[in-house]
Amino acid sequence: MKILVFSLLAILIIGCSRYRAVEVSNSAVAAAKPTCQTAQLATEVQQIAAVTKGPVGAAFELLGTNESAFFEGQRHFPMQSVYKFPIAILVLRQVDAGKLNLDQRLAVTPADFIFDREFTIQRKYPKGAELSLRELLRYMISESDGTACDVLLRLIGGPEKATQGLRELGVENIVIARYEKEMAEKPAVSYENWTTPETAIQLLKMLHEGNVLAKPSHDLLLDLMINSRPGPKRIKGLLPAGTIVAHKTGTSATVNGVTSATNDIGLITLPDNRQLAIAVFVSDTKADQKTREGVIAEIAAAAWKCWAQK
């Protein structure tokens, strides 16, 4: 009788254990998210990009996973104002090291002015001013002010030192060679400031993972990128209202009907709070601004659909 009771108990325990194992397994399957069909996404990007009749590059990575997709990911593209993102990182690294201070004031003179545009230093301070490093960072990132960029680039030693600083971070395929004023005066030199979509994603990932900046500097830069004014019709253009996007645009002049750069890179916060890094570069095209920005918006929307709408 005792043997029978023990046998029945053993059967029940084994049965419960097996049921629990199946339950856990089924829960794990239910919790797993299907992956984005990245090959299909790359094909969709190619179809969207065709309308520009020029080079387009794009890169995506769902941070914290191995999921990524690329289209012309290793091609060199002129950055234009996208290069203000790595410059900001280099400035803030010197703040973190105690070499610079966010409250220190720097002289900005009319000789530094590049072009007159709404929300620029030139508009607000036509006779020049002494501005804090924090203010200059805001102008450079949130307003894409070229004057602020040149002042800060000089502060960290100029283009060559900036490129060297990126190499020290392990970032190879970003070259900073020219000031904003040089690009404004001679647009052809803008091609010398270049990166690849894959490298833009690498730097966004490094920022997200906290590998390049102390937390206060990291938070400041993200806030400036989230509140960036230019480019509302690019990465953000077709995403659901209220989507948080920390981004930096870049736009060239149009010369002889050809626009060499219409760019946007950034971090998209998905509905489940995962971060999607994205970089889109539209180059050397006769397409108008609406078309160029629409291509970036459609590519970002395709990536959103691939990773967010499960």
Image (cartoon, rainbow, N blue to C red):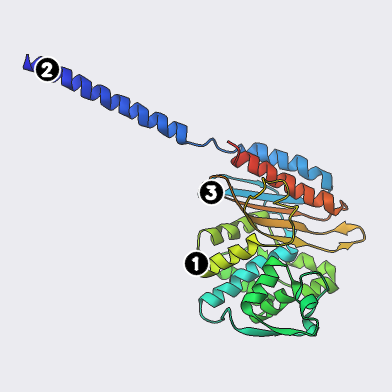
The quarter in which the C terminus is drawn is top right
User: Which class describes the residues within 10 Å of circle 2: few (<14), some (14-19), or many (20+)?
Assistant: few
Residue at image point 59% right, 60% down: 203
Q: Disc 3 and disc 2: Cα gap in Å?
A: 52 Å
Residue at image point 64% right, 52% down: 278
Q: Which residue is mark 3?
A: 273
Q: What is the secondary structure assignment of the residue under circle 3?
A: loop
Residue at image point 76% right, 40% down: 47
Residue at image point 54% right, 58% down: 208
Viewer-nearest residue: 240 or 210: 240
Q: What is the secondary structure assignment of the residue under circle 1?
A: helix
Q: Which residue is mark 2?
A: 5
Picture coordinates of residue 71, whole percent (x, y) = 69, 46
Q: What is the secondary structure assignment of the residue under circle 2?
A: helix
User: Which class describes the residues within 10 Å of circle 3: few (<14), some (14-19), or many (20+)?
Assistant: few
Q: Disc 1 and disc 2: Cα gap in Å?
A: 62 Å
Mark 3: which amino acid?
Answer: Asn
Mark 1: which amino acid?
Answer: Lys
Relative to 103, 186 lies left or right: right
Q: Disc 3 and disc 1: Cα gap in Å?
A: 19 Å
Q: Earlier in the sequence, mark 1 or mark 2?
A: 2
Instruction: Indicate whether 102 appears above or below 25.
Output: below
Residue found at the very far left of the displayed protein:
1
The quarter in which the N terminus is drawn is top left
- Disc 1 vs disc 2: Cβ atoms closer than 8 Å? no
Residue 47: mark in rendering: none
Mark 2: which amino acid?
Answer: Val
Viewer-nearest residue: 222 or 21: 222
Residue 215: mark in rendering: 1
Picture coordinates of residue 138, whole percent (x, y) = 66, 71
Picture coordinates of residue 152, whole percent (x, y) = 67, 77
